[in-house]
């Protein structure tokens, strides 16, 4: 086998169609692009996503990373380390935390988060607990009560 023998098979290569070169060439005058309009012009056509002047879909959607959650549950959150200063075996709920001045807003239900350490046994009442917070409260000898 020589380099000169490496040629395409007969019939596998087609000639390029020369458009717009007269009526006898088969694709004369409008070159197969129709009569008039934007798509028949040289350099014609539109960019991807163009909707003819209508506000395109990518501009109609909200410019956010994610769509917002409708009726999202808001919580008053507090970390376990803030509860470490409270006296042992005391009941901890939203009302007692507001009275102690630890929580300033009691508008939303209470959720306990697990940042920090706790060495005091407490009876904690809240709407929600993180797994870490529940483990730390129970490891200190306290109890977690989920209220509605």
Image (cartoon, rainbow, N blue to C red):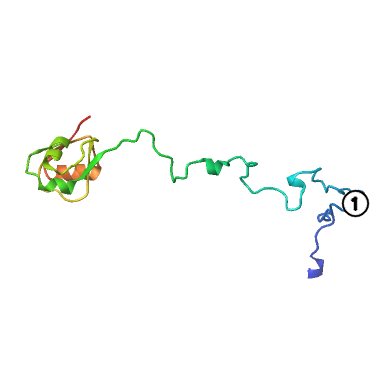
Work out which residue is located at the far front of the displayed protein and give it.
Answer: 53
Q: Is residue 2 visible?
A: no
Q: Is residue 30 visible?
A: yes
Camera-side residue: 120 or 61? 61
Q: Residue at x 6, y 43 (%)?
A: 88
Tell me: 129 left or right of 2. Answer: left
Look at the numbered disc 1 and give the secondary structure of its residue: loop
Q: Which quadrant of the structure image shows residue 139? A: top left
Badge 1 local density, few (<14 within 10 Å), some, or many (20+)? Answer: few
Label tally: 1
Residue 130: percent from the left, percent from the top? 25, 42
Residue 120: percent from the left, percent from the top? 10, 46
Camera-side residue: 36 or 66? 36
Residue 75: percent from the left, percent from the top? 26, 38
Q: Which quadrant of the structure image shows residue 5? A: bottom right
Q: Where, quadrant-wise, is the N terminus in this rendering? A: bottom right
Residue 35: percent from the left, percent from the top? 81, 43
Q: Which quadrant of the structure image shows residue 11? A: bottom right
Tell me: 24 left or right of 35. Answer: right
For residue 142, above or below residue 31: above
Work out which residue is located at the far top of the displayed protein and give it.
Answer: 148
Q: Where, quadrant-wise, is the C terminus in this rendering? A: top left
For residue 49, above or below residue 148: below
For residue 68, above or below residue 25: above
Q: Residue at x 65, y 41 (%)?
A: 52
Residue annotated with mark 1: 22
Q: Residue at x 63, y 42 (%)?
A: 53
Work out which residue is located at the far right of the displayed protein and give it.
Answer: 24
């Amino acid at each position: 086998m020589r380099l000169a023998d490496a040629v395409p098979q007969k019939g596998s290569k087609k000639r390029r169609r020369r458009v717009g070169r007269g009526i006898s060439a088969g694709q004369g005058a409008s070159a197969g692009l129709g009569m008039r309009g934007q798509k028949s012009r040289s350099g014609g056509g539109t960019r991807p996503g163009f909707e003819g002047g209508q506000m395109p879909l990518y501009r109609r959607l909200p410019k956010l990373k994610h769509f917002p959650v409708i009726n999202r549950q808001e919580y008053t959150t507090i970390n376990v380390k803030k509860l470490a200063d409270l006296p042992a075996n005391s009941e901890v709920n939203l009302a007692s935390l507001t009275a102690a001045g630890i929580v300033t807003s009691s508008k939303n239900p209470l959720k306990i988060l697990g940042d920090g350490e706790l060495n005091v046994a407490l009876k904690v009442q809240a709407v929600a607990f993180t797994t870490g917070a529940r483990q730390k409260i129970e490891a200190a000898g306290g109890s977690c009560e989920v209220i509605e």
